[in-house]
Each structure stands twice: as C-alpha cells, then as structure tokens.
Image (cartoon, rainbow, N blue to C red):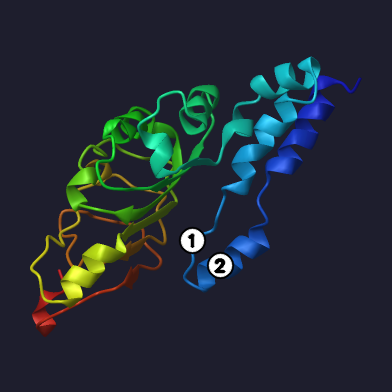
Amino acid sequence: SLPPEILTTIFQCLMEPDTQQQHQRTLAGNPPSNRSATRIPITITHVCRYWRDSALGCPFMWCPIVFEPKDVGNKYSLPYLCLQRSLGAPLDVQIRCNKGMDPRIWGELAARSSRLRSLQVTDLLAPEQLRDLRQAVPLLHTLRIEVGHHLLDRRWEGEDLPDELPELFAGSTPALRRPTLSLFTSFSTNRFANLEMLHLSHQIYRTPGELG
C-alpha cells in the first residue's frame, strides 16, 4: 500500500478546487459551488479501512462544508460531521437558509470563527439571523451574503424591510478583500478596513441619500 504521506497528497489534490472555474463564476456574479466536493471524503472512506483511517487523520479533507436546509437542524448530518472532523483546519462554509431554520448553525460557526476562511450565506430570511457572528475572523477572505428572493420581491413592491447589515465579527476582518452583499443598503456598524472591492447587488434606493 502507499505510504500515508503520499496517500494524503493524493487526497489533497482531489480536494483542490478548479480555481479557474471558480474565478469565472465569481466574475459572472455566481458563487462557486462546492456541493460535489463534499461527497469526495465520503467516497474515499468507503474504499478500504486504510484509506478511511488516512482520511480521518486529514482535517483538510472535510472542507468545503455545505449546509442545505435539511442539514441545519440535524446534528448528525454530514456538514456537522465535517465540522467535527475538520479539527484545526481553515473552514470554507456555504449555508442555504430556509424558514424555521435551526439557529444552532450560527453558534457552531461562531465557536470556530478563528478558522473561518470563507463564508457564503444564500436565501437569508432575516438579517437578525447573522447576529450570533460576533467573534473576530482573522482568516476570512471571502464573504457573500444573499437574501431570499421573497424578500427581494417584497422590497421591490415597496414594503419597508430592515436593510441594515448587523455588526459582524466584532468589526475584525483583516483578511477580507472583496465581500458581496445583496439588498443591504446600510452597513455603518461594519468597518471593512482592508477592502479592495465591494460588490453590492439588488440595491433599492428611494432617495440618493439612502446609501449607508
């Protein structure tokens, strides 16, 4: 059998994203999808006991972590298992929200904030869901927050909805360079100090002075 260090290198190659494809998706305004990558570790652990033991000893194998609505309320789901097995590795997390979403996910992320490298939240139902993300994130370089389509529809129809982004990460995001935010027209409590670019989408202003 292959030595563990060679096997680990092969695993790492399997987990590396197609950076060119992800760059093209980002330019097109679409968040890179990592759902298929989440199945790779499970497939590897089913090959044989030696491969399983090697994979369980590699924290980087369990990232990216993608939470679908059905996963968030189930502590035995694959994404929560990946969080546990990631140990001290940097975290790349995607979360798709839904109505009645279990709030425990935000606490799980807050407890691992020092390892959070990228965070993508889609179909957000209410800005208040983010309020538990209060700890500093020294590694975070990618942040994408998109609200649900029904909120956008209600806002286009003229309904007065909260559009202030809550203060996130104690205002400490030293590695963040290019966040993407949808709907939020004000984020005055967040001091993104080192940005190179800020992508705002689905902005609706009634007067020129409404940009926060």
Residue 102 percent location from the top left of the image: 28, 35
- Numbered label tally: 2
Q: Is residue 50 left or right of residue 139?
A: right
Quadrant containing the C terminus in the rendered view: bottom left
Which x, y percent locates residue 49?
Answer: 77, 15
Relative to 159, say whether 206 is above or below.
Answer: below
C-alpha span from label 1 to label 2: 6 Å
Q: Residue at x 39, y 33 (%)?
A: 114
Most extreme residue toward the right, as rendered? 1
**Do labels 1 and 2 touch, CB within 8 Å?**
yes
* Residue for badge 1: 31
Q: Is residue 113 above or below residue 32?
A: above
Specify the amino acid type for callout 2: Arg
Mark 1 or mark 2: which comes first in sequence? Answer: 2
Give amino acid for label 1: Pro
At x 44%, y 34%, the residue is 115
Q: Nearer the viewer, residue 176 or 101?
A: 101
**x and y percentages locating residue 59 in the rendered image:** 60, 27
Q: Which residue is mark 2?
A: 25
Identify the element where label 2 is drawn.
Answer: helix
Q: Is residue 108 left or right of residue 34?
A: left
- Residue 106, by quadrant, is top left
Residue at the image point whose x is 65% and y is 64% from the top: 21
Q: 136 above or below 99?
A: above
